Amino acid sequence: MDLNKKLDVLEKIYKIYDDFAGNLDVACKKYCYTCCTRNVTLTTLEGYRIVDCLISDGKAYLFDIIQKDLHKRRFQPSITTNLLAELSIAEKDIPDEKSCYSWGECPILTDRQCPVYKVRPFGCRCFVSKHSCSEKGYAKVDEFILSVNNIFLQYIEHIDSQGCSGNLIDVLLYFESSEARQNYRDGVSNCAENNLISNRSIPALMIPPEHRLKIQPILQAILSAGSEE
Ligand code: SF4
Ligand code: SF4
């Protein structure tokens, strides 16, 4: 699948998730930004789309803002969702990865709003909570929603299996270079040299038995989004 087709599939997948999330009973609303931290992760496919928009919308100045805080701590994952699935299937140890909201806000957050809202990554779309995170100090998420989020994460990584994943900051800075963007269009990614980790195909979907029936309509929608291309 070429890059434009992958971006089309990504668009459809986001739409499926946004429709699903739009029907949830959650406390999320405009200007609520406690979940906008320096710890957001995404795939290169999503990052490429964001950087393309930053450049075409005249928001490339955000790269300088990101650079200024580069010394600050951020969550840099050591395994992707599909590698986690692989390790779980093989009953191997899962690395203990920690992140904390106290490491600071997402560097591109502007006036309590997301400047790339329409193209924000799945990692931001799937932040939902039944109660206000700022009031309680943590998010409350239904187990079924977590299962749904996992299959979306697995599928998005799968369609970008030749690419990488990592922290939003690292992925955006990686694509600041026009050479990196061209390489990515040509199917070449340099993950390890850029604080990123290699994506993988889905080994098996991580769906707990109690959610397997209920999740079918969403799963079918995701699969048909990919097969239409
Ligand atoms: S997940 Fe929490 S912080 Fe984010 S929008 Fe929802 S309620 Fe607000
Ligand atoms: S990309 Fe946008 S939605 Fe995501 S954390 Fe940053 S400001 Fe928030």
Image (spheres, rainbow, N blue to C red):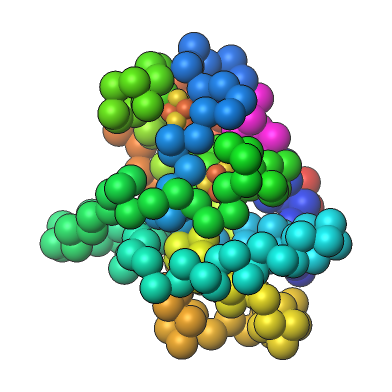
Which residues make up the magenta segment?
Answer: 14-21
Q: In the figure, is residue 202 to the left or right of 62?
A: left
| Vertical comparison of 201 with 179: above or below | above
Q: Does the magenta stretch include residue 18?
A: yes
Residue 139 rendering spot, x and y as whole percentages? 34, 28
Q: Is residue 122 visible from the viewing direction of this image? A: no
Is the magenta region chiefly helix, strand or loop?
A: helix
Q: Quadrant of residue 31?
A: top right
Residue 8, horizontal then vertical, whole percent? 77, 52
**Nearest the eye: 121 or 200:** 121
- Please name the residue shown 69% across and 47% down the image: 115
Task: Tell me the residue at 61%/25% (across/down).
Answer: 30
Residue reaching furthest to the top: 25
Classify 172 as above or below 214.
below
Question: Is residue 19 shown left or right of residue 213?
Answer: right
Residue shown at 69%/48% (left/top)?
Answer: 116
Name the side, left or right, on which 6 lies relative to 212. Answer: right
Whole-percent x, y for residue 82 in the image = 39, 58
User: How many marks can you see?
Assistant: 0
Can you say which quadrant of the picture contains the N terminus?
bottom right
Q: Quadrant of residue 173?
A: bottom right
Do we see residue 66 in this rendering?
yes
What x and y, as percent, mark residue 113? 63, 38
Q: Residue at x 60, y 33 (%)?
A: 17
Q: Nearer the viewer, residue 142 or 68?
A: 68
Q: Is residue 14 left or right of residue 137?
A: right
Q: Does the magenta stretch include residue 73?
A: no
In the image, residue 22 sits, relative to residue 123, either above or below, namely above
